[in-house]
Amino acid sequence: MKRIVFFVLMGLIGVSFAGENYLKLSSGAGGPGTSHNVISIYLDNSVPVRGVQLQIADTLHYMSPDTVWTVGRAKDFDVAYNPEDYDGYLTLILISAQTIPADTGKIMQISYSISPDAPLNSVVDLLFLKIIVTDSLHHPLEVEYHNGKFKVYPTSAVESIGHVDFQYQLKQNYPNPFNPTTQIDFSMKKDGYTKLEIFNLLGQHVRTLLSASLKAGSHSMQWDGLDENGKQATAGVYLYRLQSGDFVETKRLTLLR
């Protein structure tokens, strides 16, 4: 599969930061041959942002972009992209005369498909290869960044070991309590669109760990204790909920600090 590189331009020229500024590429997961697997780009900026230029690479070349859209503070930006750019690169341009206000959170999401040939249980590094950020006067400034990972989930055990009658089941996470990561195992009776989410005890959404079409069989996810904005969640008891078709189950887990 060809290499995927994303160029992102916000505004007409570049993006700008002063003080501490941070870009984060989220991690994701999906099975071979699946689509609508979403990764997110987070931006923490201490000053208004005019534009950003990024290169993001799938190191194992298993991922093909489906679509791209802006969210949060960048939701009013128009995004244009050409999936057939030179050298297998995908160029994205966010067009707006506005700036992204200083704050923290998700600014963009990218939906992609996974090659049917992607090896099971492989982990793909998602790397920022190039980052250029500038302030409203187009002065380049330094920015910290955090790369992401994508896990290729196993296909159904029905395909690998013969017929098995799986049932819908959400297992207790382990370790529990945990710090810094915990694993959540679950099984599905049928293929279907599946969501695995974290909530606090007030029912407020904290993190979406999985939102993708999966095959029947056994699967697992990890939570690293980060919220949807890439920030460390506070210590305490949380709820994790699995939903696939008509099946919904919720359990509790405890995060230590």
Image: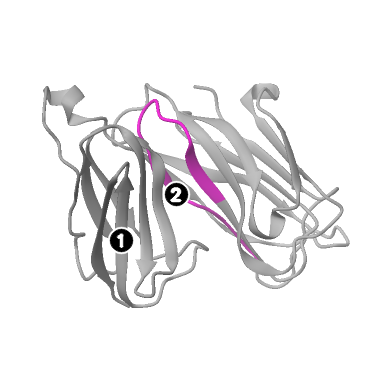
Q: Label 2 to label 1, Cα distance in Å?
A: 18 Å
Q: Which residue is depicted at the point 62% across and 24% down?
A: 88
Q: Which residues are magenta?
A: 21-40
Q: Amino acid at mark 2?
A: Ser
Let me know if residue 30 is in the magenta part.
Answer: yes
Say whether residue 32 is left or right of residue 108. Answer: left
Label 2 SS? loop
Foreground mark, 2 or 1, reads 1
Q: Is residue 236 above or below residue 25?
A: below
For mark 2, what is the residue? 27
Q: Is residue 183 above or below residue 95?
A: below
For mark 1, what is the residue? 240
Q: Nearer the viewer, residue 232 or 201?
A: 201
**Label ID, residue 129:** none
Q: Residue 184: x and y, percent?
A: 25, 54
Q: Residue 152: x and y, percent?
A: 35, 36
Q: Nearer the viewer, residue 223 or 36?
A: 36
Q: Residue 214: x and y, percent?
A: 33, 35
Q: Which residue is depicted at the point 18% across and 59% down?
A: 172
Q: Which residue is depicted at the point 20% across and 23% down?
A: 159
**Among the 4 quarters of the image, the one containing residue 157:** top left
Whether residue 180 appears in this view of the structure is: no
Let me know if residue 78 is in the magenta part.
Answer: no
Sequence-first tag of 2 and 1: 2
Whether residue 102 appears in this view of the structure is: yes
Label 1 SS? strand
Q: Amino acid at mark 1?
A: Tyr
